[in-house]
Image (cartoon, helix red, strand yellow):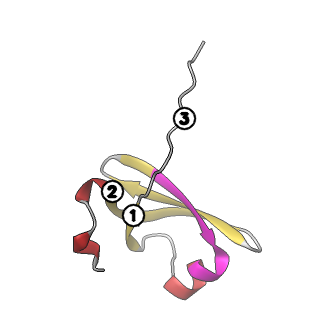
Amino acid sequence: MSIQAINVRNQFKGKVKAILEGSVVSEIDIETPAGIVTSVITTRSVKDLGLVIGTEVVALVKATEVSIAKLL
């Protein structure tokens, strides 16, 4: 499956803004036109993809559940 085959509503093009690297998983902040999208991926994947601040990426979102809480 190519990236083009995925619904455009589930794609956010942007640049890596920050990387909080852990021993097993890392938190990646991606700056997109819609705002910051944060992803948690394995640190191995960060290294395999060569992600550094400024890398252009596409965040692909798959949400099967959305929870809502009322603010007081």
Question: Is 43 in the magenta?
Answer: yes
Tell me where residue 45 appears, x and y as whole percent: 58, 80
Magenta span: predominant SS is strand
Mark 2 residue type: Asn
Is residue 72 left or right of 61 when viewed as pictured? right
Q: Is residue 42 above or below residue 48?
A: above
User: What mark, if any, has residue 31 been given in the picture?
Assistant: none
> At 64% from the left edge and 82% from the top edge, which residue is drawn?
44
> At 28% from the left edge and 67% from the top edge, which residue is drawn?
6
Residues rendered magenta in the picture: 37-45
N-terminal of the pair, mark 1 or mark 3, is 1
N-terminal of the pair, mark 1 or mark 2, is 2
The CA distance from mark 1 to mark 2 is 6 Å
Looking at the rendered image, the disc whose residue lies closer to the viewer, 1 or 3, is 3
The CA distance from mark 1 to mark 3 is 19 Å
* Residue hosting label 3: 67
The CA distance from mark 3 to mark 2 is 18 Å
Q: Are marks 1 and 2 in contact (CB under 8 Å)?
A: yes
* Residue hosting label 2: 10
> At 33% from the left edge and 58% from the top edge, which residue is drawn?
12
Tell me where residue 8 appears, x and y as whole percent: 24, 59
Mark 1 residue type: Leu
User: What mark, if any, has residue 60 been given in the picture?
Assistant: 1
Q: Tag 1: Cα neighbours inside 10 Å, few (<14), some, or many (≥20)?
A: some
